[in-house]
Image (cartoon, coloured by chain):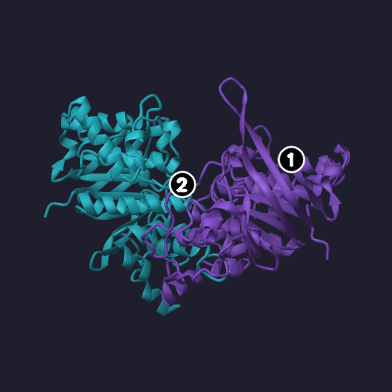
Amino acid sequence: MTPALEVIGLTLDFRQEGRSLRVLDGVSFRVEAGRTLAIVGESGCGKSVTALAIMGLLPGTARIGGTIRLGGRDLGAMSAEQRRLLRGGEMAMIFQEPMTSLNPAFTAGDQVAEALRLHQGLDKAAAFAEAVRMLDRVRIPDASRRAKQYPHQLSGGMRQRVMIAMALACKPRLLIADEPTTALDVTVQAQILALLDEMKRETGTAVILVTHDLGVVADHADDVAVMYAGRIAEQAPAAALFARPEHPYTAGLLGAAPGEGEPGERLASIEGTVPDLRAPPPGCRFAPRCPFAVARCDSVPPLVEVAPGHATACWRAPLDQVLEAA
Amino acid sequence: MTPLLELSGLVKRFPVRDALGRRAGAVHAVDGVSLAVAKGEVLAIVGESGCGKSTLGRLMLRLIEPDAGSVRFDGEDLGALSPAALRARRRDMQLIFQDPFASLDPRMTVEQAVAEPLRLHRIVPREQEAARVAELLSRVGLRPELARRWPHEFSGGQRQRVAIARALASNPRLIVGDEPVSALDVSVQAQVVNLLSDLIRDLGLTFVLISHDLGVVRHVADRVAVMYLGRIVEQGPAREVLSAPRHPYTRALLAAVPGHGVKAPPLEGDVPSPIAPPPGCRFHTRCPFAEARCRDSVPELGGGDHRVACHLADSLPAPEPLPPRLAGGDRLRRLQSFFRAPAPNQGAQS
């Protein structure tokens, strides 16, 4: 079956002060219809620019290489106008801060209706009626009244619901959610993530969930790609990743999240900082911070399968060997 | 023993004005909070946005004036102090903010930023200033030669270390950290959490941690106070409150933390507006157990070590125990042991 989205060898370079900066270095993954792929990593790892590259929302100074296929069609071969028509129709994106993506001058209902008029050719009245139905489906109480309200009259959670209604109104093949709940309180976050799960089940949309929160990944992702400094470090079904991480960075991240171990126990801290992409380490980009690094790590490790569907870019994997040797 | 910090009956309201500048009600930010923090204790104040936790932090340090109630520091009523006496007291009480990008003056070098409180409170003679700054920087895991650098040259984690060094400069007895690690990436956050734990232990600090992150709270707090819409709904020893919560809101807050495999949201709806908080128990509009009396009468926090402001606390069914978060098992623990820096303050240069 053709996956909803296929990304092969994605590279991204920015020109900066006359020099080229490689922000993504050969990122590959696929997302099937009705599944959620979480892309997880810390600031600067490239997770958000990956999302923007897929959407075609990067500035003109960005040079993109590799292949992105949506439903089997090569997006790189399309004109800018064709790409524009995909956005909001076949592919949609929601962001961390809905206030910056909603237009403050239009009501919630008008903004959802606009997508329907543009992509589905509905007339004004039909589009607004469908918008109210969508707002109701994302569980906005009293949807017909709320549809006539402006973004500033809505709470943060409500705004994110409007964004989800807008994104899903045209039944996209792919929905990218970039830190969709990071700005929300934890009880509201739980509501929004449950809503995304439910909408995905109903519509069969493929979802890419970009997040820094491993808890969110554990509860809401089917598959996970862990990114570090512009590359995928490890890729696996979610359950396998948490049960048997095969990249030292993943293991370190899992240990750095406080609250799992005994209170007061020292947290696993990954010493140092992420590499400067202007002068990245020659081989494995995690090697300078890795407690298991050896001489071989000076060359770039390929992403190889260690179990079905579970791949890691680490010369020392499987890590059981490292533990036995210790 | 006298607590180091004692808050009683604190109330703070912020007036809300309409477009014409007329008074149109008030945000009930803090509404009758009493708390005591013992010397050397880490008290966490948790809750969601708008619950009043940051306002409470500012009231504690007398950075804002309460509308009612009192703050006693080491037995002394801060409200009764003259402005000069209050200024002198400030050396004992420091605040660390969430955003180290906003809290450091971009026109001051790290040395100037850390030396400022030394000078203000005349902690050391001028000629010893540089040595003391170097000592403070190494105390927070920064190389002293970074002293001549500017804040923009630092990462978020390094800036937060500078902010911590600055807070430590006046040898305070109390530090209030308002979401001190919330803006940091998880690997850097772990380094700063480890640093704070070391400092609290080694310097015998009393620490009030204001945080929405229950993972961080579980890790460092001795006691926890849970706030909802300006009031404390539950408080007690951290281990008890976080593992055997008694208030329905605390239970929901804990169940909502992702990673336990709980897929259904524990609460519906949003937090009501603090401009018009619900009567009775403020949580009754979202509480799955609410009864008629919860709408009418305000539940008292009660006494004892573990207190809860809920009419139904004694009759509620015991909560389902939450499955462990992100349980990785023995193999993962062994892998992680290689990351755990055994000695504090060595090479941590986040």
**The color chain A is rendered in:** cyan
- Asked where in the image residue B111 lies, by quadrant, the reply is top right
Which chain is in purple here? B
Residue of label 1: B67
Q: Position of residue A141 (x, y in %)?
A: 36, 43
Q: Amino acid at mark 2?
A: Asp
Location of the N terminus of chain B by quadrant is bottom right
Graded by Cα atoms within 10 Å as few (under 14), some (14 to 19) or many (20 or more), the crowding at tag 1 reads some
Determine contact: label 2, label 1, CB under 8 Å.
no
Residue at 21%, 42% (x, y): give it.
A172
Residue of label 2: B270
Judge whether residue B50 can be spotted in this image. yes
Residue at 46%, 44% (x, y): give it.
A183
Label 2, label 1: how far apart the Cα atoms are: 27 Å
Residue at 44%, 77% (x, y): give it.
B330
Q: Amino acid at mark 1?
A: Asp
Asked if badges 2 and 1 are on one and the same chain, I answer: yes
Under circle 2, the secondary element is loop
